[in-house]
Image (cartoon, grey):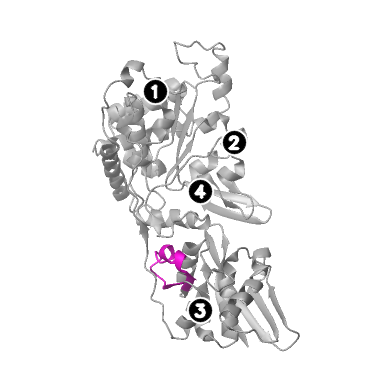
Amino acid sequence: MVARAYTVAFQGVQARLVEVQCAVAPGLPAFTVVGLPDKAVSEARDRVRSALNALAVALPSKRITVNLSPADLPKEGSHFDLPIALALLAALDIVPPDAAEATVALGELSLDASLVPVLGALPAALCAAEEDRILLCPRASGAEAAWVGATQVIAVDSLGDVVRHFTGQAVVPPAEPGEVVATYSGPDLRDVKGQERAKRGLEIAAAGRHHLMMVGTPGSGKSMLAARIPGILPPLTAAEALETSMIQSLCGLLDEGGINRTRPFREPHHTASMAAIVGGGRGARPGEISLAHNGVLFMDEFPEFPRTVLETLRQPIETGEVVVARANAHVKYPCRFMLVAAANPCKCGYLSDPARACARVPACGEDYLGRISGPLMDRFDLRLDVPPVAFTDLDLPATGDTSAMVASRVAAARAVQARRYADHPGTFQNADAEGELLEAIAAPDTEGRALLTKVAERFGLSARGYHRVLRVARTIADLAGEERVRRPHVAEALSFRLAQMAL
């Protein structure tokens, strides 16, 4: 008799169904796991044997063979422990074989038969729902997996609970979806003295998910401004939270309480490798751009990143996804993020400071910012010059809008966009609009069109730059509550774009 249970193998954010077949046959006593397992999966037989001993279940003196099908799909991770144990219990008639066969299981076993939480419970639950099976997982993983309402999630503490559940001795109730309620307690935008234009740029970028570049002398407040972006972003919608949490689940970044609605804010160091930023390494894991999906990727000291790393950002910025191609893996990850970059104007940092004359004008700035290629710079929707704040201004009381006030305007603008793009799959914010849709929603009035045409000819805007100005103008109009893009909106969008042309 061959007993079957099911589990998953991960390929990016996708979970592929794996059939766990277990046969107990006469022969020399042995416990073999086949089907292209890695070291962690091969060691499962020892953990399963010890866990069964803890339950006073003795393995028969027969040949036990476990096959992981399809056999040509690499199997990695410790989450194969529980499905192997479940298939073996079904083969020994300890649990009903039909119940095991209707289950997708994942979990790591301790030697005392308790279950350890594993990565990927959320993608596994989606796979179980597609296959019309229940999901069996450790209790600590149940809150996130239960967010997939299309399948029943059974979260247990130990292998003994699994046996009692399937034999009807103590049925485990389905897990409930959990949500980590996080109240923003970070720095407030009102604490920033001066920099009113920079604050306005942050608001526009957050409202339309536009890419933002800040250039200023050391200590002018670029990092301080970027640190306040999470406070003005709206929480993730249910669909966005599910997308983002699938990536976080694979990386072990989800809290045991469930899913968090806070938008990701990733800030990698400038010494990060290409695999760390884009994705790769063992198993082609997601990189920082995917971990920032539906959130913000802040890259401080932007020109200090390796040139090869910066150039790899060009395609993901446009497409919203990245394909990590390696010899043993070909994986696609979503990466629809808002890129916020900060840089000094030159190597010494004081090219634009009249009080500290740069000794190598203008070569210092050309060499330093020249590390950012023209095609990459063209992908920034807004460019902000962040001047130093006068010492006298630092002693003034805090003025301007708080983060909560700006966040309410950003949320209102995003709500307008959500209604606008409800019938356009793949388009979520103004930054995603293109083609005929962009022409329909962002066509400026006659005066605005004339201004845009004149500036495009005078400064040689690229076609990409032309369309990005329209997207920013549409966002400015949304913030103002305007149905039509007018000349003032185009003029303000151009003012942020023309600052970029100075590079």
Name the disc covering residue 290, or none: 4
Mark 1 Cα within 10 Å, few/some/many (few <14, many 20+)?
A: some
Marks 3 and 1, how far apart at CA: 72 Å
Frontmost of labels 3 and 1 is 3
Q: Nearer the viewer, residue 24 or 275?
A: 24
Give, as a three-letter code, the residue at label 2. Thr
The image quadrant where one finds the N terminus is: bottom right
Marks 2 and 3, how far apart at CA: 47 Å
Frontmost of labels 4 and 2 is 2
Frontmost of labels 2 and 1 is 2
Q: Position of residue 45 (x, y in %)?
A: 65, 73
Marks 4 and 2, how far apart at CA: 18 Å
Name the disc covering residue 455, or none: 1
Mark 3 Cα within 10 Å, few/some/many (few <14, many 20+)?
A: some
Q: Nearer the viewer, residue 223 or 472?
A: 223
Give, as a three-letter code, the residue at label 4. Ser
- Discs 4, 1 touching: Cβ within 8 Å: no
Q: What stretch is highlighted in magenta?
A: 135-156
Give, as a three-letter code, the residue at label 3. Gly
Name the secondary structure under disc 2. loop
Name the disc covering residue 160, or none: 3
Residue 365 in the image: above or below residue 136: above
Q: Quick one: label 3 or label 1, which is nearer the N terminus?
A: 3
Give the quarter of the image for residue 94: bottom right
Name the residue at 36% across, 58% down: 179
Name the residue at 54% across, 85% down: 97
Mark 4 Cα within 10 Å, few/some/many (few <14, many 20+)?
A: many
**Would residue 304 be visible to someone looking at this image?**
yes
Q: Mark 2 points at which residue?
A: 271
Give, as a three-letter code, the residue at label 1. Val
Q: Quick one: label 2 or label 1, which is nearer the N terminus?
A: 2
